[in-house]
Image (tube, coloured by chain):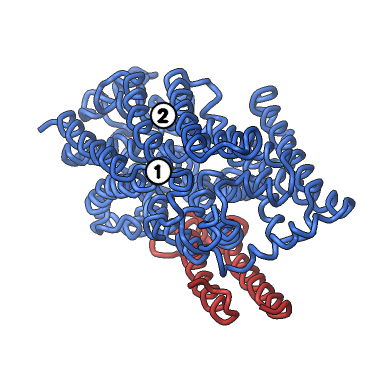
Chain colours: A blue, B red
Amino acid sequence: MDVQIWTYIIVGITFALYIGIAVWSRASSTNDFYVAGGGVPPVANGMATAADWMSAASFISMAGIISFMGYDGSVYLMGWTGGYVLLALLLAPYLRKFGKFTVPDFIGDRYYSNVARTVAVVCAIFVSFTYVAGQMRGVGVVFSRFLEVQVEWGVVIGMVIVFFYAVLGGMKGITYTQVAQFCVLIFAYMVPAIFIAIQLTDTPIPQLGFIGTLDDGTFLLDKLDGLHEELGFASYTSGSKPIIDVFCITAALMIGTAGLPHVIVRFFTVPRVKDARISAGYALIFITILYTTAPAIAAFARTNLIETVSNKEYTSMPEWFTKWEGTGLIAFDDKNNDGVIQYVGDANQNELTIDRDIMVLANPEIAQLPSWVIALVAAGGLAAALSTAAGLLLVISTSVSHDLIKMQIAPDITEGKELMWARIGAGVAVLVAGYFGINPPGFVAQVVAFAFGLAAASFFPAIVLGIFYKRMNKEGAIAGMVVGLLFTLAYIVYFKFINNSPEAAESWFLGISPEGIGTIGMVINFIVSIVVSSLTPPPPFEVQEMVEEIRYPRGASKEVIHH
Amino acid sequence: MEKEQRKRYWKKNVSYLTILLIVWFLASYGLGILFAEPVNTIKFGGAKLGFWFAQQGSIYVFVVLIFVYVILMNRLDREFEVDEV
């Protein structure tokens, strides 16, 4: 059977599965809709969190980015996993004990202020929308490349599926579909990786192959460094970015992860405080499977690619080469007209440009794996994109129905009405996300990377200080969030959109790129918060009592029933 | 629970956090970034050790840290009788 038929079959089966789960797990109360009734088992929550977290970018692009960046790509590996340590140790257990529905709930109650609540709502919606547009686009791209449907129709199909289980099931539907999506995506990621590890390094475990030897007895990474040196690329295993920038980007990504609302809210869905702690652990194990495989794929694919194309006759290229040329992801420009591909570090002599996404999407073809494996990659990419999109849409819908309507505009609203608003919110959010998926604003791709910096500079300090520093008051928190956010935003906008010439990099503050500036924004937030709060009156007694309460686990399951 | 007890529980929690976060910092920012260069002279299988920590080792350490924390805290919760039934 050819790839196309396999893809239709596998994608069809997975979609039927998601819809079946959605029907089975419909939400009947706001508690179901917002936090899946607060009764998700920790292992299931771990899988759901992992699927929620690993987006189209993790699945499709990350291995490719690392493949081209080598050591410098480590910022994503450490940055997108290390945040879970912060979540498990500093945030998740206490927010679970606090026991409400959203991040703005915590900010609003802890800082006894609707201004703070509104700042948090605006941040949550902004971060989630920029993110979700990218996911819908990812769905469209996978459809168009594997099934040769137009991107637009791909987005529409994705919207219909997400609409179905997000609007119907809320958090409950999303959680259990995410569990299924995690299984699909991790299987789809690992199968080609294992095949290629066996081919190249004679071990089925990619993580061992990564530090193992090739058929000729040289270590894979030594071979790769050698090839890079020969062709004039920067060394694969050492970096070219300044240390301080690598440090700051990693920190911004880590801390941003711990401050992202769609991740935090997952820890409201488990029954007890100890379940919140351990489900962060399970989530990280599930994420680690993919994140430690990605650098192995990166090194395998890079080696395979160089050996296949470098100094070979253009006419002798395998079938996948021409196929992907058709999509514009590979481009060959025979500058010296010798019919041979020169793939080298020097931009003036290099004749081949390769899109990074190809490293995962075309990897099975490059390694000549069977067609069902190629089809599996399509289903995995879709699972990754849809699961993340659903989690984000839920944050948006909850922000509208709960944080704005229930908590501020119409507190007397009945539960049935609130649930209706939550569904309307989810529906509208799907449409808006779909629109941006079809007509992506040019800035989306760039903005997604900055969502982390903004989350790091705004939410993270406010939440951590709210838990660990009783004296922290609303004046300090609001001042900190606003200053941290504005500083980070201004720096990013200035160096990314206003003064983005290559020379501008020389005037970066301490050599820190816009991607890493969220770390400085966070430090500023902490300082401003503490200074302002020490100059203004302490928070009311009840708030200090509340902070005292969330520090001790006993009674967490009781508190959910009160809602 | 008495105030003194509560204070002791919280202090213990914060000291666990501090130690675990120091390890967290050393495994990622330390071995993987700040000292990657000197650590790279050591080889781990086919990888330079600093590079390996940046792309593999730090992530394994993160997983272990969370589970150590879970075990420590579950024990502490029982000891101070703030655990959940």
> What percent of the width, then of the height, locates residue B85?
48, 72
In the rendered image of this protein, does residue A55 appear above or below residue A151?
Answer: below
SS under mark 2: helix
Between A427 and A379, which is closer to the camera in this rendering? A427
Relative to A28, A125 lies left or right:
right
Q: Amino acid at mark 2?
A: Met
In the rendered image of this protein, does residue A200 appear above or below residue A115?
Answer: below
The mark lying in front, picked from 2 and 1, is 1
- Residue ID for mark 1: A28
Q: Can the viewer see residue A275 in this picture? A: yes
Q: Which mark is residue A18?
A: none
- Could you tell me which residue is drawn at 41 percent across and 51 percent down? A291
- Could you tell me which residue is drawn at 59 percent across and 41 percent down? A452
Between A280 and A146, which is closer to the camera in this rendering? A280
> What percent of the width, then of the height, locates residue B27?
55, 63
Q: Can the viewer see residue A229 in this picture? A: no
For the residues labelled 2 and 1, the Cα–Cα distance comes to 27 Å
> What percent of the width, then of the height, locates residue A134?
46, 30
SS under mark 1: loop
Relative to A261, A294 lies left or right:
left
- Residue ID for mark 2: A136
Q: Amino acid at mark 1?
A: Ser
| Rendered image quadrant of residue A491 | top right
- Is the residue marked by circle 2 packed among few (<14), some (14-19), or many (20+) residues within 10 Å? many
